[in-house]
């Protein structure tokens, strides 16, 4: 994993170092199996898809284990990736968010079939002499990864898309402790695992990526504005994320109340639906906006599939989320040549360069957040300047090819 000029320097405690792994012959391809049990494709799953599509086939023999089903679009996406061997696998029922009784019932009902499928996958790994198992941080994936590694002698890599937290269950903590490598999606995310006590020599950071070709900054803004009902000439701020407290929507609405006196027609489009564990967030945000007297200035769109069109329509993208692990949506907004307003914590500063492609303020400082919004709303030339720099930054540092190159180097280090 090379040092990236866009990332904060890793703490010396978890700089990569050589481990006592088996050697990979230079005259053949490295064999890697991706483990992803997701039925629906979230951000972590899309990153795996992007990586699978961009690891060079001449250097790697790629396999994937996915969970099929009547409602499993993630498996269908895996099947559409060229040049990989896909093995349907029963990972058992998801136990996330269930009560202890429901977990026991789920295990009792699904464990025999899942165990048989796991043993079959272990035989598959041995037969194909797979050397590295690469899983997401979902509990089923992470646990399967280290168990299969123990059964087959392959190396286990868990790709951490979230910061370490005490909310994580015993199973996934057990898996992290036995993985040969934990890879955070930012230096910040990696540091949270070191701070939690995981071995620094096994913790690494590889920045996420997006496909810039899927984000066209020349899109006409008119259709997006029309779909939101934004009046002609009204400045538009767009925020895209699942709705829960940590994403900073309440703070953003509060900042908008400070912006409105100078820009009475300003509109804020909040794009996304409530996170299942935080149902009621939309209702509370509407009440908050109404109490501040800006109910007519805030648009709630719910889930939308036309994110590029909405970003093309906006003047500013803003998501003041707390302790964001990486923030793919920031890179997407930058690819659309839109300036970003966010916070100075988490992995955000590794993506958004303050004063170059966006403006960052300290968490909890509503006045500073509002000031950053006003500065950009008042200066169209600065918005253009930030947008141009943001696009170039994405094209230089957040491409699938760069991410694949970083993982290729890490795989080589693991097998050295």
Image: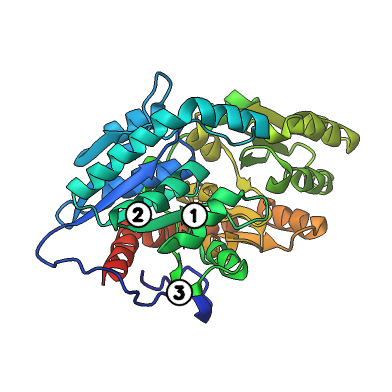
Depth-wise, is mark 3 or mark 1 nearer the camera? 1
Mark 3 burial class by Cα count in 10 Å: few <14, some 14-19, many 20+: some
On the question of residue 400 being in view, the answer is no
On the question of residue 196 being in view, the answer is yes
- In the rendered structure, are the residues bearing label 2 and label 1 in contact, judged by CB atoms less than 8 Å apart? no
Q: Which residue is mark 1?
A: 175
- Picture disc at residue 408: none
Name the N-terminal-most of marks 2 and 1: 2
- Residue 281, placed above or below residue 379: above
State the image coordinates of residue 234 (x, y, percent, origin top left).
68, 36
Q: Which residue is mark 3?
A: 201
Which of the 4 quarters of the picture holds residue 115? top left
Q: Residue at x 18, y 48 (%)?
A: 128
Q: Is residue 336 left or right of residue 262?
A: left
| Inter-mark Cα distance, 3 to 2 | 19 Å
Q: Residue at x 50, y 29 (%)?
A: 305
**How is colour applied across the structure in the image?**
rainbow
Mark 2 burial class by Cα count in 10 Å: few <14, some 14-19, many 20+: many
| Inter-mark Cα distance, 2 to 1 | 11 Å
Name the N-terminal-most of marks 3 and 2: 2
State the image coordinates of residue 232 (x, y, percent, origin top left).
65, 31
Q: Is residue 32 left or right of residue 162?
A: left
Q: Which residue is mark 2?
A: 149
Under circle 1, the secondary element is helix
Name the N-terminal-most of marks 3 and 1: 1
Q: Residue at x 67, y 40 (%)?
A: 235
Under circle 2, the secondary element is helix
- Quadrant location of the C terminus in the rendered image: bottom left
- Residue 195, placed above or below residue 288: below
- In the rendered structure, are the residues bearing label 3 and label 2 in contact, judged by CB atoms less than 8 Å apart? no
- Quadrant location of the N terminus in the rendered image: bottom left
């Amino acid at each position: 994993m090379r040092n990236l000029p866009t990332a904060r320097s890793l703490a010396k405690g978890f700089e990569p170092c050589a481990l006592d792994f088996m050697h990979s012959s230079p005259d053949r391809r490295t064999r890697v199996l991706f483990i992803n049990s997701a039925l629906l494709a979230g951000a972590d799953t899309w990153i795996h898809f992007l990586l699978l599509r961009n690891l060079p086939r001449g250097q790697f023999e790629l396999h994937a284990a996915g969970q099929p089903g009547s409602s499993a679009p993630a498996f269908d996406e895996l099947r559409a990736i060229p040049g990989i061997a896909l093995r349907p696998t029963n990972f058992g029922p998801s136990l996330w968010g269930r009560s202890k009784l429901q977990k026991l019932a789920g295990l009792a009902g699904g464990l025999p079939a899942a165990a048989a499928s796991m043993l079959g996958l272990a035989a598959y790994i041995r037969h194909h002499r797979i050397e590295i198992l690469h899983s997401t941080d979902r509990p089923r994936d992470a646990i399967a990864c280290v168990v299969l590694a123990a059964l087959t002698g392959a190396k286990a890599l868990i790709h951490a898309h979230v910061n370490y937290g005490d909310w994580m269950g015993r199973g996934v903590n057990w898996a992290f402790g036995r993985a040969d490598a934990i890879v955070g999606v930012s230096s910040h995310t990696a540091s949270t695992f070191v701070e939690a006590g995981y071995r620094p020599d096994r913790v690494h950071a590889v920045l996420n990526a997006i496909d810039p070709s899927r984000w066209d900054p020349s899109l006409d803004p008119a259709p997006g504005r029309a779909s939101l009902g934004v009046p002609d000439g009204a400045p538009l701020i767009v925020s895209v994320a699942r709705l829960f407290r940590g994403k900073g929507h309440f703070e953003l609405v509060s900042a908008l109340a400070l912006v409105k006196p100078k820009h009475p027609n300003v509109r804020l489009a909040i794009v996304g639906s409530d996170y299942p564990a935080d149902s009621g967030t939309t209702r509370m945000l509407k009440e908050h906006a109404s109490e501040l007297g800006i109910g007519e200035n805030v648009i709630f769109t719910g889930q939308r599939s036309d994110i590029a069109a909405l970003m093309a329509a906006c003047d500013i993208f803003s998501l003041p989320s707390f302790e964001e692990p990486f923030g793919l949506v920031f890179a997407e907004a930058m690819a659309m040549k839109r300036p970003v307003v966010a916070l100075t914590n988490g992995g955000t500063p590794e993506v958004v360069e303050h004063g170059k492609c966006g403006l960052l303020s300290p968490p909890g400082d509503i006045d500073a957040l509002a000031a950053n919004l006003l500065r950009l709303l008042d200066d169209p030339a600065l918005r253009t300047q930030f947008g141009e720099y943001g696009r170039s930054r994405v094209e230089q540092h957040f491409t699938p090819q760069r991410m694949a190159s970083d993982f290729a180097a890490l795989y080589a280090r693991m097998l050295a």
